[in-house]
Amino acid sequence: MPLLIGEIFRRNARVVPDSPAAVMGEVELSHARLNARGNATARVLREGGVRHGDRVVTWADTSLDMLPLYVGLAKLGAVFAPLNARLGVGEAAEVAAVARPRLLVADAERAPELDELARRAEVPQVARLGGEGPGDDLVAAAAAAPDGEIDEPGLRETDTHVLFFTSGSTGRSKGVILSHRANYLRTYQGVFRDEPERSICMFPLFHMAAFTLATSAWQTRGEICFVQPPTADALLAAVERRRANRLYCLPAVWGRILEADPERYDVSSLRQVDTGTSATPIELLRALKRRFPGTATRVHYGSTECGSGASLADADVLRKPGSVGLPPPGVELRLDEKGEICVRSDVLMDGYFDNPEATAEALQDGWYRTGDIGSLDDEGYLSIVGRVRDIIRTGGESVAPTEVEQALADHPGIRELAVVGIPDPAWGEVVCAVVVPNEGAEIDLEGLQAHCASRLARFKQPRRLELIDALPRTAATRQIQRTLLVERIASQPPGA
């Protein structure tokens, strides 16, 4: 049987038609209803000229109206390509143009600017998910359309299912090509589950993680509950209300959850509390084990391009602090001569859309070059040292920013910290500590150097200090935008 994403919805509609598939707030969508609305949406799109292989870009925030579009495009063999809803018209047009889409779909909030976005990105057709504005209202049109099964005879599992755009924080955005087969295998959880997965999602529906979590739950005939905005109280309330058994959060969000009142919510249904994406301190993992007894905690490492690269199992999270674990079954992992992590598996991306140069740089001899620098311990467990492009070259030596950050992390005056390399005519680059200080704290360069003197060689210690109010981060994953920091700091004299 071909591994097609649309088959997941057909199957669930037959087997568990009345069970919930997706929830947001008080609105619930059953598996049968999701499949039927997906079919009707596909029929409307096909009548509007969208065909197998066409790309459809969405500019919309999280709502259940996005899901029938996702389902319908999968069945048509058209390509789903979500834009970050936080982007303005100019930024959105630049990213959308990368995909050369046939159709642009906006939600009601963004519908008034839809024509302008389409003009700038040179998109020939537009449509809306409700609201007033140009193009057809797909929600209304689908409600009036037949919802019988729709099929695309030419669809193959190796055809493109989605394009997810990279953040573009280090240059031109790239569209990551993922096939039906890759996404099916990435989200398949086997046949030996005790119960369907009931998962709470903190990610917005323009982020790959949201669709990965959702499709993973649907593979088990389970449900996904979207929570926006993902405050600690809202996430915990959703766990209690839906009797959720899985909650995946970024470390920063887990930190806020752990600060919430532990007695206000019944979270006894949880069985999995997962994390990843950024560094996970051992203190956080210990706190999760205390706060959620009886659950399994896992740390995940991966990317849009490669899927899961490694994971740290519950049995190892306290035994292997700082590690991201072992590659999962079916994944090969190695370090090249410079320590760059390379991954090979059947679920890698097919490349970057319309960008052969970037594809050739990232995919070499069947291996995906992650851009991360790693180390392996004597048991083969992987730890992330830094990014290839983040490695600081100073006076002929190499410095990993994460190593310096770890040495400074327990400084009492530091609330947030990032270490970057700033161009310097004498040293090539100098190690610069960018610090968000705690309120009332006085921090100077000499104090930072003294704090890490016993932990770091002299050449690794900061030579420059910049105090700022907040670190620039990506909207969805809260990753520090180091390139932006370097650009800002390099354009001004020290201490300005």
Image (cartoon, rainbow, N blue to C red):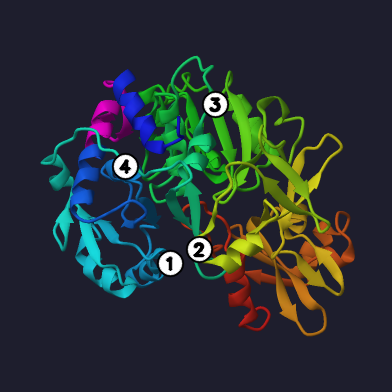
Instruction: Name the element at disc 3.
Output: strand
Q: Which amino acid does label 2 sit on?
A: Lys
Q: Which one is in front, 247 or 464? A: 247
* Residue 322 x %, y %: 73, 41
- Contact? badges 2 and 1 (CB < 8 Å): yes
Would residue 159 be visible to someone looking at this image? yes
* Residue 344 x %, y %: 67, 45
Disc 4 vs disc 3: which is toward the camera?
A: 4
- For disc 2, the marked residue is 174
Determine the image quadrant of residue 266. Answer: top left
Q: What stretch is highlighted in magenta?
A: 17-37
Label drawn at residue 152: 4
Disc 1 vs disc 3: which is toward the camera?
A: 1
Q: Earlier in the sequence, mark 1 or mark 4?
A: 1
Q: Which of marks 2 and 3 is nearer the N terminus?
A: 2
Quarter the C terminus occupies: bottom right
- For disc 1, the marked residue is 98
Tally the marks.
4
Q: What residue type is labelled 4?
A: Glu
**Alpha carbon of mark 2 to alpha carbon of mark 1: how far?**
7 Å
Instruction: Name the element at disc 4.
Output: loop
Disc 4 vs disc 2: which is toward the camera?
A: 4
